[in-house]
Amino acid sequence: MSVGNDVVDLADPETRLSGLHPRFDERVFCAVERDVLEASRSRHVLHWAFWAAKESAYKALKRLAPEAVFSPKEFEVELSPLPTTGEGGVAVGRVFHRGDVFELEVRLDGASVHAVAKSKDEAGARVLWKVERALGDPSVAVRRLAASAIGSALGLDPAGLRIVRRPPVATHRDRRLEADVSLSHHGRFVAFACTLARRDAIGCPTTFDPRPFPPV
């Protein structure tokens, strides 16, 4: 399985639609997506939900096909209606890219949009995710967030857990875990998503790959 995630801070000046290039929508969204945006009463949020969905699917694809390049218009998003409450919620859907299909969840909390896309080859895998406000360097903060959540899920001391390399992988005492990790940050927020290979392996040392992980 492969997973990707992307977070957008809806209050960041970069997200003002009035500040985008006049041809942004034409370059990024397919005709169906543009029609949906035109009809939406929450265009600002939906615009960035579509963008985060495309980014997250690309990250998932990149792990499976390292030669892949990001052409946003080729990642076509099919998404259920966004929650109408100000407190947020979850929209679900799919992202299509040529012959690949990625399952999609988009979470809204009123301040951010967080998309998680995963390949469909291992439906039973557990997916962890979390969004929080960044404290200090976002690159450091997002790795700390992921290490803490993964360590908690596996019953491991987060102090011995590291997120290394690109695309990211999780290691514990320099041994790789069976977990795909995706990191993102934007504006005030950092976020991660991670797959854990087997539900019945949570907390068990058999989640380790016994081969030493090469130094970074």
Image (cartoon, rainbow, N blue to C red):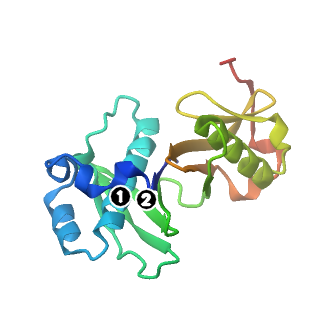
Q: Position of residue 52 (x, y in %)?
A: 39, 53
52 sits to left or right of 157: left
Three-letter code for the amino acid on which mark 1 is drawn:
Trp
Q: Position of residue 63 (x, y in %)?
A: 46, 37
Q: Are marks 1 and 2 in contact (CB under 8 Å)?
A: yes
158 sits to left or right of 139: right
> Relative to residue 145, is residue 43 depicted above or below?
below
Residue 152, numbered circle: none
Identify which residue is drawn at 25% across, 74% down: 40
- Pointer 2: residues within 10 angstroms few (<14), some, or many (20+)? many
Identify which residue is drawn at 74% across, 25% down: 211
Identify which residue is drawn at 21% across, 70% down: 36
Q: Nearer the viewer, mark 1 or mark 2?
A: 2
14 sits to left or right of 2: left
Identify which residue is drawn at 14% across, 51% down: 26
Q: Which residue is mark 2?
A: 10
Q: Secondary structure at mark 1?
A: helix
| Residue 101 showing in the rendered view | no
Distance between mark 1 and mark 2 Cα atoms: 8 Å
Q: Which residue is mark 1?
A: 48
| Residue 28 showing in the rendered view | yes
Q: Position of residue 111 (x, y in %)?
A: 50, 64
